[in-house]
Amino acid sequence: MKEQLMEILGDLRPDVDFENEKQLITDGVLDSFDVVSMVGALNDEFDIEIGVADLVPDNFNSVDSIIALIERLQDE
């Protein structure tokens, strides 16, 4: 799962070190357009539905938080 996520993120923003960045939203590394693109790719890749209620900064601030979101949605 992490490899797939890293590929999506790398395609989205190849200039960002996603392994070490822990404040992607808080620090403005990703903007709203990046998040919208990422949500679409995550929905398709992992067969999940990220809803409006899930669009909070804490869910997208780091690779670990994105993985936690994916896992939670897959379990629902």
Image (cartoon, grey):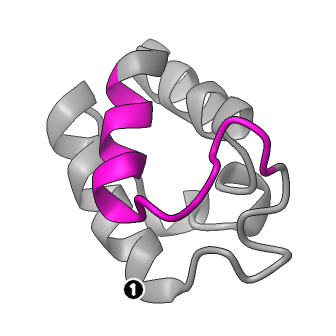
Residue drawn at 33 percent across, 62 percent down: 12
Residue drawn at 57 percent across, 24 percent down: 72
* Residue labelled with disc 1: 33
**Above-or-below relation of 42 to 29:** above
Left or right of residue 57, residue 42 in this image: left
Residue 40 at x, y percent in the picture: 23, 59
**Above-or-below relation of 76 to 22:** above
Is 11 within the magenta?
Answer: yes
Residue 17 at x, y percent in the picture: 64, 50
Looking at the rendered image, the quarter that the C terminus falls into is top left
Q: Mark 1 is on which residue type?
A: Phe
Q: Quadrant of residue 8?
A: top left
Range drawn in magenta: 4-21
**Above-or-below relation of 37 to 65:** below
Q: Secondary structure at mark 1?
A: helix
Is 47 within the magenta?
Answer: no
Left or right of residue 7, residue 34 in this image: right
Q: Nearer the viewer, residue 60 or 55?
A: 60
Left or right of residue 70, residue 46 in this image: left
Q: Quadrant of residue 68?
A: top right
Residue drawn at 79 percent across, 56 percent down: 58
Left or right of residue 75, residue 12 in this image: left
Residue drawn at 41 percent across, 59 percent down: 14
Q: Quadrant of residue 51?
A: bottom left
Looking at the rendered image, the quarter that the N terminus falls into is top left
